[in-house]
Amino acid sequence: MNKSDLSIVKNINEKDVGQTIPEVTMFNNYDIIVLKKIFTETLSEYENNNSSNKGGKDMSEYITKEVFDQFEKRIDHKLSSLENKVDSLPSSSDIKVMLLENNKELAKEAKQDRNTVIGWVIGFVGLGFTVAKAFGWL
C-alpha cells in the first residue's frame, strides 16, 4: 500500500465518522469501538516490535504467514479476554431483580420519610395548641 492509497482510505474513513451503522448489523457502536481499539493496540504492538527488531519500519505489501499467525493469536487472545469480561457481567434478569429490590427499598424509605414528616407536623401543631392555651388565646 503506498501513500496515495493510505490517503484515500483516510478520506473514506473521515467521511464515515459520526455515521450510524445500519441496524441489520449484529454489532452496536460500542462493539465496533472495542474491536477497533483491539485491532489498533495489536497493530501498534506489532509496529513497536518490528521497529525495535530492525531499527525501522519495514513497509511491505506482503506479510509472512508467521507474522499473520502472531497477529491472529494476539487478536484471539484480546477477544477471548473481552468475552470473559462480558461473561462476568450480570444477566438482564439479575439486573431486573436488583432494580426491583432497589425500588422496594426506595418505596419503604419514601413511606418512612412521609411518616416522619406527618409526625413532625402533628408535633408542631400540638406545640402550637399548647402555646396558644398557655397565653390564653384559646
Image: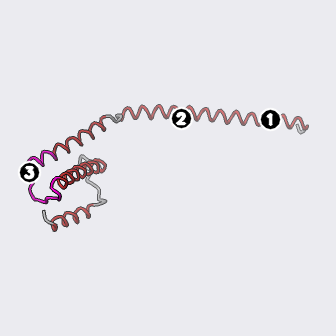
Q: How many angstroms separate mark 2 from mark 1 (CA)?
A: 31 Å
Mark 2 residue crowding within 10 angstroms, few (<14) / some (14–19) / many (20+):
few
SS type, badge 2: helix
Q: Where is the C terminus found, in terms of image quarters?
A: top right
Residue at image coords 20%, 66%: 7
The quadrant where residue 135 appears: top right
Q: Nearer the viewer, residue 33 or 98?
A: 33
Mark 1 residue crowding within 10 angstroms, few (<14) / some (14–19) / many (20+):
few
Residue 45 image offset from top left, x and y in percent: 22, 50
- In this picture, is 51 found above or below 114? below
Q: How many angstroms separate mark 3 from mark 1 (CA)?
A: 90 Å
SS type, badge 1: helix
Mark closer to the observer (2, 3): 3
Disc 1 designates what residue?
127
Residue 54 image offset from top left, x and y in percent: 15, 55
The quadrant where residue 12 appears: bottom left
Disc 3 designates what residue?
64
Badge number at residue 26: none
Q: Nearer the viewer, residue 12 or 51?
A: 51
Q: Amino acid at mark 1?
A: Leu
Q: Which residues are magenta?
A: 53-70
- Taking the magenta stretch, the answer to whether it contains residue 66 is yes
Residue 30 image offset from top left, x and y in percent: 31, 49
Disc 2 designates what residue?
106
Residue at image coords 66%, 33%: 116
Q: Where is the N terminus found, in terms of image quarters?
A: bottom left
Left or right relative to 132: residue 18: left
- In this picture, is 82 found above or below 42? above
Mark 3 residue crowding within 10 angstroms, few (<14) / some (14–19) / many (20+):
few
